[in-house]
């Protein structure tokens, strides 16, 4: 039986993050989303670490549960996948994994590097050991939940493995220009260049919001590594906007999660539209310049208005480092699951638009309004979580709870009938459900068949 995990989030102790990011609220919103396992985020921050030890309890598996809530509840409602049993989903307790994002800023080979990495630990003892190792190197851990250290990524990996041989070290949002390991402005051209003789311990990378798995499948060095996706949420509603479905029993705990990533056995991922990411295309926001990869090839990377260098986006960076072109992947979309016929063992993925965004657009208002949040909670509470609503619940059921407009929006997302304006140079892209001409128009429901499962 598979489970859904979002292992890159932040706490209220990270800069530019919601003060509502505490353990009880995370549990509540994980249930709204349909997430089974959450990363704690920020475990190196001393105040957050103290809260985690106060609010969470270890069950011996490497997962943690909120005190007072059983993690052994009934199994999740399925099937998310073909081989799952069909059992009630929403009553299973939420588990946690100790996770942190670390910003490494240093100089190597005559070039400044700014790389963000995720570190997962199997227990409090290992996490505390890692914390002490960093403090012994004069790392400042109390000013930000995502600490900035002057330790090279390779050395940071070494310290994590010294703290626990079961530590997982995942380059975060790998393609982000300023902070990704493959970033155009501050990263590397390969994992080998960064981690050298320790590259074998990098079992996977995080796609980030501006890339999807197919873009990563074009890189030969990633052929034997898991391509995983998480939300990097700075607020409760953004939990699960990207997530990974792990193939295995949740009772297998951290060891099962570790081996699933190491052996490339994830079931699939849930993806944000990469065009909506804020670094998808090359451009310069101050001058309102945005180039596709094709335009970049002909026009170059110098801004025609101010003469400064453009921020090279993820799509262009993939083109630079790719070992194969997109056509060689032979992509296939069957029932909303996107796969490669060339690499059939690669797990598929689904492109989704957050339910709050659908509701907000149908109401012609902002996603943060109380009206939207109340409608969202009503819908997911009655129908078993956001992921189920977006992928499996019949449109008629959605319409009974929230009306035909929201049901129509969910149907359009399932059909990928969207209007997309890609992001660039720190400007988020825009994914719209309705264009101006059709907004308000009703769509025939009889032709809209619900998805039967995430990866069926």
Image (cartoon, rainbow, N blue to C red):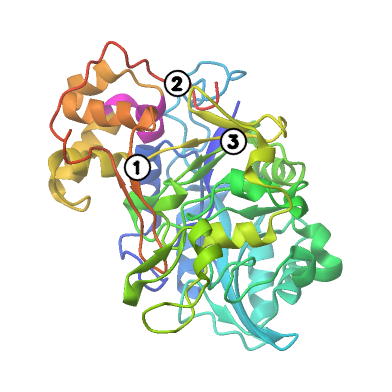
Q: Is residue 250 left or right of residue 222?
A: left
For residue 77, above or below residue 364: above
Observer-nearest residue: 103 or 133?
Answer: 103
Mark 3: which secondary structure? strand
The residue beneath circle 2 is 88
Looking at the image, do the residues carrying marks 1 and 3 touch, with CB atoms under 8 Å apart? no
Quarter where residue 154 is shown: bottom right
Q: Which residues are magenta?
A: 382-391
Residue 62 visible: no
Work out which quarter of the rendered image holds the N terminus and state it. top right
Q: Is residue 96 left or right of residue 254?
A: left
Residue 193 locus on image (x, y percent) = 78, 71
Residue occupying the point 49% across, 18% down: 87
Quarter where residue 84 is shown: top right
Observer-nearest residue: 170 or 327?
Answer: 327
Between marks 1 and 2, how big is the CA–CA gap?
A: 23 Å
The residue beneath circle 1 is 354
Q: Is residue 261 magenta?
A: no
List the single residue furthest toward the top. 446
Q: Is residue 322 left or right of residue 66?
A: right
For residue 242, above or below residue 200: above
Q: Which mark is residue 268?
A: 3
Looking at the image, do the residues carrying marks 1 and 2 touch, with CB atoms under 8 Å apart? no
Q: Is residue 217 left or right of residue 391?
A: right
Neighbour tally class for label 2: few under 14, some 14-19, many 20 plus, Cα within 10 Å: some
Mark 2: which secondary structure? loop
């Amino acid at each position: 039986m598979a489970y859904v995990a979002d292992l890159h989030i932040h706490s209220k102790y990270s800069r530019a993050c919601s003060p509502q990011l505490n353990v009880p609220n995370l549990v509540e919103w994980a249930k709204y989303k349909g997430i089974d396992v959450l990363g704690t985020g920020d475990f190196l921050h001393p105040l957050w670490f103290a809260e985690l030890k106060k609010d969470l309890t270890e069950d011996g598996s490497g997962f943690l549960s909120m005190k007072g809530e059983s993690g052994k509840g009934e199994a999740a409602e399925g099937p998310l996948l073909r081989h799952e049993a069909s059992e009630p989903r929403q009553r299973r307790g939420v588990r946690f994994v100790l996770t942190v994002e670390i910003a490494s800023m240093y100089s190597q080979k005559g070039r400044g590097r700014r790389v963000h990495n995720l570190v997962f630990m199997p227990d409090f003892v290992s996490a505390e050991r890692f914390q002490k190792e960093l403090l012994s190197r004069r790392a400042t851990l109390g000013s930000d939940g995502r600490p900035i250290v002057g330790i090279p990524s390779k050395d940071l990996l070494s310290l994590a493995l010294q703290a626990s041989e079961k530590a997982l070290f995942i380059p975060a949002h790998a393609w982000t220009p300023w902070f990704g390991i493959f970033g155009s402005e501050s990263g590397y051209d390969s994992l080998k260049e960064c981690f050298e003789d320790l590259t074998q311990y990098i079992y996977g990378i995080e796609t980030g919001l501006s890339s999807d798995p197919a873009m990563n499948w074009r890189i030969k060095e990633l052929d034997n590594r898991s391509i995983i996706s998480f939300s990097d949420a700075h607020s409760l509603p953004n939990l699960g906007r990207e997530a990974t479905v792990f193939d295995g029993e949740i009772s297998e705990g951290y060891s099962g999660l570790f081996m699933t990533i190491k052996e490339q056995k994830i079931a699939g991922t849930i993806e944000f539209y990469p065009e909506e990411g804020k670094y998808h295309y090359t451009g310069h926001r101050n001058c309102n310049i945005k180039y596709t990869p094709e335009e970049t090839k002909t026009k170059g990377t110098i801004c025609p208005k101010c003469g400064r260098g453009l921020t090279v986006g993820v799509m262009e960076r993939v083109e630079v480092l790719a070992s194969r072109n997109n056509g060689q992947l032979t992509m296939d979309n069957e029932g909303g699951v996107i796969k490669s016929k060339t690499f059939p063992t690669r797990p598929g993925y689904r492109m989704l638009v957050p339910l709050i965004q659908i509701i907000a657009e149908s109401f012609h208002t902002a996603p943060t309004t109380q009206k939207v949040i109340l409608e969202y909670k009503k819908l997911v509470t009655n129908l078993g979580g956001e992921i189920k609503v977006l992928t499996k619940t019949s449109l008629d059921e959605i319409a009974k709870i929230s009306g035909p407009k929201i049901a129509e929006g969910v149907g359009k997302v399932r059909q990928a009938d969207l209007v997309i304006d890609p992001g660039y140079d720190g400007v988020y892209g825009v994914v719209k459900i309705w264009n101006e001409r059709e907004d308000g128009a009703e769509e025939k429901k009889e032709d809209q068949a619900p998805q039967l499962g995430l990866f069926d």
